[in-house]
Image (tube, rainbow, N blue to C red):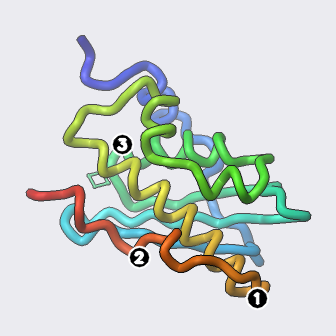
Amino acid sequence: MALYSEKVMDHFRNPRNVGVIENADGVGEAGNPVCGDIMKIYLKIENDIITDVKFETFGCGSAIASSSMATELIKGKPISEAMTLTNKAVTEALDGLPAHKLHCSVLAEEAIRLALRDYFDKNNIPYDPKEFPDAHCDTCCHT
Ligand code: FES
C-alpha cells in the first residue's frame, strides 16, 4: 500500500488556499518546536461565517496537505463549526496519514483555533481560554 493516500498527494501537489489575507480578521500561528514546522492561518469573517481562509506553512508535505484540507473544511462555515474542527476530521478527509505524520495535521487544527481566538480578542468577544491550545504543540513529537 502506498504511504500516502491519493487525496494527500493531491492536496500536497495542488494545495488550496495558499497565501496571505491582507487585513485578516484573525491570524493564528502554530509551531512544533521539535520538527520546526510552522503554520500560519488567516481568516476573513463576516456575520460569524468564515468567508475566506488562507494559509502559509513552513512545513512538510503532510503539513501542506493537512492545511489545504483544513481550510477547505472551514471555508464558508460558521465559526462554531470551525471551532470544533479536529485533526482527526482533517486526516479522515485526507483518507488517513501515516501515524508518524499525524502531528502535522494537529498544526493546522491549532493554527485555525488560534486565528479564531485572535478574532475574538480583536472584537472583544468572550471565550473560554481552555478551548484554545498553547501556541505550539509539544505533545505529539517525541523524536
Ligand atoms: Fe512536523 Fe510535518 S514533520 S509538521
Residue 99 position, x and y percent, is: 23, 36
Q: Which mark is residue 135?
A: 2
User: Which residue bears the numbered disc 3?
Assistant: 61
- Can you tell which quarter of the image residue 30 is in? bottom left
| Disc on the earlier residue, 3 or 2 | 3
33 shown above or below 12: below
User: Which residue bears the numbered disc 1?
Assistant: 124
Q: Quadrant of the N terminus?
A: top left
Q: Amino acid at mark 1?
A: Asn
Q: Quadrant of the C terminus?
A: bottom left
Residue 35 position, x and y percent, is: 22, 61
Residue placed at 20% from the left, 41% from the top? 100
Residue 14 position, x and y percent, is: 55, 35
Query: In the image, is the residue at mark 2 within 8 Å of ligand 1 by its beta carbon?
Result: no
Residue placed at 43% from the left, 40% from the top? 88
Contact, mark 2 vs mark 1 (Cβ under 8 Å):
no
How many residues crowd mark 3 within 10 Å: few (<14), some (14–19), many (20+)?
Answer: some
Residue 89 position, x and y percent, is: 50, 38
